[in-house]
Amino acid sequence: MTTAALPPYTKKDFQTDQEVRWCPGCGDYAILSAVQTVFAEAGIPRENFVVVSGIGCSSRFPYYTNTFGFHSIHGRAPAVASGIKMVRPDLEVWVATGDGDSLSIGGNHTIHMLRRNVGIKVLMFNNRIYGLTKGQYSPTSELGKVTKTTPFGTADRPFNPISLAIGSEATFVARSVDVFQQHMKETLKKAVAHRGSAYIEVLQNCNIFNDGAWDEVREKDARSEHAVLLEHGKPLIFGKNRDKGIRLNGFELEVVQLGNGITEKDLLVHDEKDPRPAYAFLLAHMELRPGFPTPIGVLRAWDDVPRYEDVVASQIQEVQAKKGKGDLMKLLRSGDIWEVKN
Amino acid sequence: MSTTTTDVPHRKREVIEEAVIRFCGDSGDGMQITGTQFTNTVALHGNDLATFPDYPAEIRAPAGTLPGVSGYQVRFSSRDVYTPGDAVDALIAMNPAALKVNLPDLKPNGILIANVDSFTETELRKAQMASNPLQDHSLDGYRLFPVELNRLTRAALKELGMDAKSMDRCKNFFALGMCYWLYNRSMDATLRWIDDKFKKNHVLAQANRLALQAGYSYCEATEAFQTSYEIPAAKLAPGVYRNISGNAALALGFVAASQKAGIPLYLGSYPITPASEILQELSGYKEFGVITFQAEDEIAAITSAIGASYAGALAITTTSGPGMALKTEALGLAVMVELPLVVCNIQRGGPSTGLPTKTEQADLLQALFGRNSEAPIPVLAPASSGDCFWIAIEACRISLKHMLPVIVLSDGYLANGSEPWRVPQLSELPDFPVRFETKAEGFHPYKRDPDTLARAWAVPGTPGLEHRIGGLEKQDVTGNVSYEPLNHEHMVRLRAEKVELIANDIPAAVPEGDDCGDLLVVSWGSTHGPVAAAVKAQRTKGRTIGHLHLRYLNPLPKNVAEVLKRYKTILVPEMNMGQLSLWLRAKCLVETQQLNKIQGKPFKQSEIERKIEEVLS
C-alpha cells in the first residue's frame, strides 16, 4: 500500500448508483449516512474497504456503499470476512449484520470471530425483530413478545448483545442509536481506529414490524431517564435533567439521586480500558434491572490483544525467515525416496 | 540387506512374484505403524505395491474385543499392482479377536503367525471363541507359527529396566523384524525411522531397535521357518519414487498448484475422518506461505475459503460426507459469485455419521446435484493415491481458469492407502498463472471471457474496481441484483454452459484393453485398481473387454456416449447403489449393468471377475 496522498473523499464517493430499497422511515438510512461519512473521513483508500453482509434488511448495506462488497449467506459474514482478512490483513473489513443474522444463525461465527480478535468491525443493527421476512421474533425480542411466530408470546429470554460480545472476549464493544447521528459517527470513528475486532450494536427502529422498540432511549443527546451515555474518564450521569448517577456499592451498581450530599465525585467513572470483564458485565446488565438506564457508548476498547490475522502472518514470516521460502522440488522429494534407473 | 539363510540346514530362499501380508491386532498393538514401516521398506526395495489400512472407528474400543481390531494389508510385487490383494499370503495376528476377524481372508496353507501369549482364556472369551484355535486343530489348513511375542520381546529388552507393559508395547517391532527376515528385507529404513521418531526418548528408541532386531534374529536362529521369500524389484518407469498416501498427495498437489498459479494457498477446514490429515499436512508448509485455518465448523471452513478466494487466494476446503452436507448452501453461493474454490470430499461410509473409518463412494450424486436450484459444479475423482496429486492440480487449474467451484471426490481407501509414486520434474507440471483484473475502464464484474464464460477476478484493494457480489441473482455483465425473468433464465443457462465448456479443456475418454467388443467395464475413483486387474485377467481368457476409467465425472469427456455405444454390454462396479450408473444412463442414454458393493471395503479383483463372467455368460 503506497503512502501517496489520498483523494479528498466526500460522502458522495461512498454512495452507489443503486436505488435504496429500505422502507421509508427505516433506521438504516441514518446508519448508512453515518457510515458513508466516516468512511470518507477515515484516511483509508476507498478500494481498501470491504463490506461483508449476511441476510436481512441490514445485509443490503453493501449495495449502497461504493466499496468492494460481499452479500453472502445468512449468518456467515464473520467467517467470509475472516477469510478475507487472513489473506489481506491490510484491508479495512466491515460486517453489516442484524440481530437475527448475527445472534441467531450467526451466533457461532460471531463468538469465534470475537474470540480470535480478527480485525473486523461488526455493525449489528438491532431492531429486535426479523424485518426482511416480515415480523418473526428474534433472539433480542423481549420475553413474552407477540409476533407472527409467537402469537402467545415468546417463551425465551433475549440475548444481551453487548454482554455476549464481552463474554466472547471482544476487545471493542460499543452501542449507539440510529437517530444519534453525531454519537454514531464518533463511535464508528473509534472503531476505525481500533485494530482488533469491534462489535458495535446500533439500536435501530424498524418502523414497519417493530415500531417504537427503542423509544425510551432515543431522546436527543440521550437525555432520558432510560439511557446513560458512557464517556471514558467521566462519571456516569443520566436523566432528563442529568440529576441521576450510577454508583458502585460493593459488587453492585446502584442508581442515586444527585444532591443531598451525593455529588459527581461519588459516582462511578467510566473506564473503557478496564480489562476486568466484571465491570463491563455490570454495565451491560444494568438495563435488566428496574430503574436502571441502558448504557450507550463505548463499553470497552483495548487494543493490547494481537489480531488473529497478524499472528497467522507472523508464523509464516518466522518459518520463512528460518527455512527460506519453500522449494517445491525439495518438498516433492521429501521422505524416503529411491531412484529407478533404466 | 544383510544375512544369508544358509545357517540352518534345509533352509531355502524362494523367489516369488508377489506376496500379500496383513498385520492385525488390537487398536493398541501398533498395527498401523508396523504396516506402514513394512510398506516403506518394500517400496524402497523397488516393489510395486498397494496398501489397505483398515481402522476401527473408535479411538480405543475395549482392549481385545472384536470392534477394536485394527489391520494393515500390503501387497508387494515384482509386477504392476492394482489392488491390495483379495486374499492374504501371510497373516500376523496379535490376539484372538484379530485372528477371528481376519482369518477368513487367509489363503489355504497361508502363513499364520500368532502371538501365543495373548491366547489366554480371558482374551479368547472377548473374541467370543469357545476354544483355543492354536490347540484345537482348527488351523490345520494353514502353516501356523505360534510365537510367544510378549515373552520373547521382554527377554530382548530385559536390560533396559522397563516395566512389563512398556516392553509388551514393543512386540509389534518384534513381529516386524520377523517379517523382514521372512521376506528378505533390510531393517535399515525402519531403524532410521525409530531413531528419528524416538529421538527424545532414548530408552524407547533402543527398545524398539532391540525388539526389531530380536524378531529378525529369532527367525534366523530358530528352525521355525524353513523358507524365506524374495520378491524382486518391479520394472517401474525410470525416475525418482516415494511412497505416498492419497491425503499427502492432495496436500502436495495443492502446494504445487499455488506455486504454478503464483498466488497464496488458503485452506479452510474442520477436522473430520478421513480428511483431517490434509489440514495437518498443509499446516506444516508455512515456508510456502500456506495459510491454514481450523475453522469453528464446516460452514465457517468453506465460507472463509470463499472470502479468501474473493481476496485473491487459491482457496481450498476439505471434508468428508457429513461436512459436505453442511457446506451445501455455501457451495451454492460459490456458484453464484463465480469465484474459484476447490472442495474435497474424502468419502466415507454413510449415511449420516455412518462408518467414519471405512471407505465408500456414495457421494457422487450429492456432488452433482446437492444444492437448491440449478447449481452445477464440475466433479473430478482421483484413481489412486498417487493420482490425488495430479487431480489436485487439475482441479485448481480448472477452477482458476473457469472461475467456478470444483469438487474433488476422493475416498478413505485412497486417502489412507499408499503406493509408490513417481516424483515429477517441475517441467511436467502445467503452468496456469493467474491474472487479476486491474483496468478500471470498462470494468463490469460479470463481463465474461467469450471462450470460457469466466468473469474477471477483481480483488479488493484494486483502485477503481469497487463492486458488490453476492448470492442474489445478478444481471449479466453489470452484476447488479436482478429479478428480471428472462435474465434469470439466461443466467441459469449460462452457469450450466460454463460447466459444459470445460469439456473442451479436458482429454477425450480412451478405454484400456479392447476399444470395442463384448463388454466395457466403467470405473471411477478407487475402483480403478480392482477393475484394471480384473479386466486384465479376463482378457487373457480371450474375451473382448474394455476398461473405461473416468477421472472427470462432470462434465464427462465429450466422447463418452460414443465410446459406450461401441460395446454390447456396460458394467459399472461401484461402492454405492448405482450412482455413476444412473448418471451415465441419463447423460448417454445407455443401459448399464451394476455391481454394487457397500460394505465399507474396496472391491476384490475376484468379485469383479465373477461378475464379468456372469455378465458374459
Image: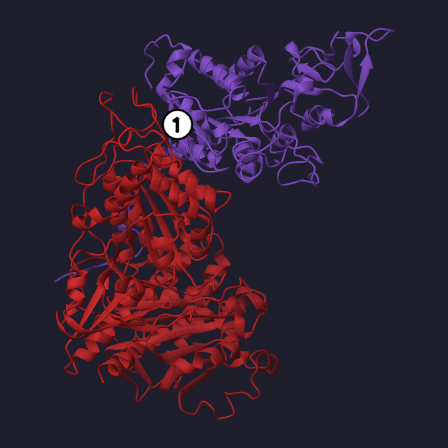
Chain colours: A purple, B red
Tell which of B240 and B256 is nearer to you.
Answer: B256
Q: In the rendered view, would you say B372 is above or below B231? A: above
Q: Residue furthest right?
A: A260
Q: How many marks?
A: 1
Tell which of B480 and A242 is nearer to you.
Answer: B480
Under mark 1, the amino acid is: Gly
Find residue B581 and report its horizontal and vertical position in percent: 30, 66
Check the picture and name the quadrant holding the C terminus of chain A.
bottom left
Local SS, label 1: strand
Find residue A166 and report its horizontal and vertical position in percent: 63, 29
Tell which of A87 and B75 is nearer to you.
Answer: A87
The picture quadrant where one finds residue B1 is: bottom left
Find residue B397 and report its horizontal and vertical position in percent: 24, 44
Q: In the rendered view, would you say B183 is above or below B381? A: below
Q: Residue furthest front?
A: B485
Q: Check disc 1 and report the residue beneath it.
A: A69
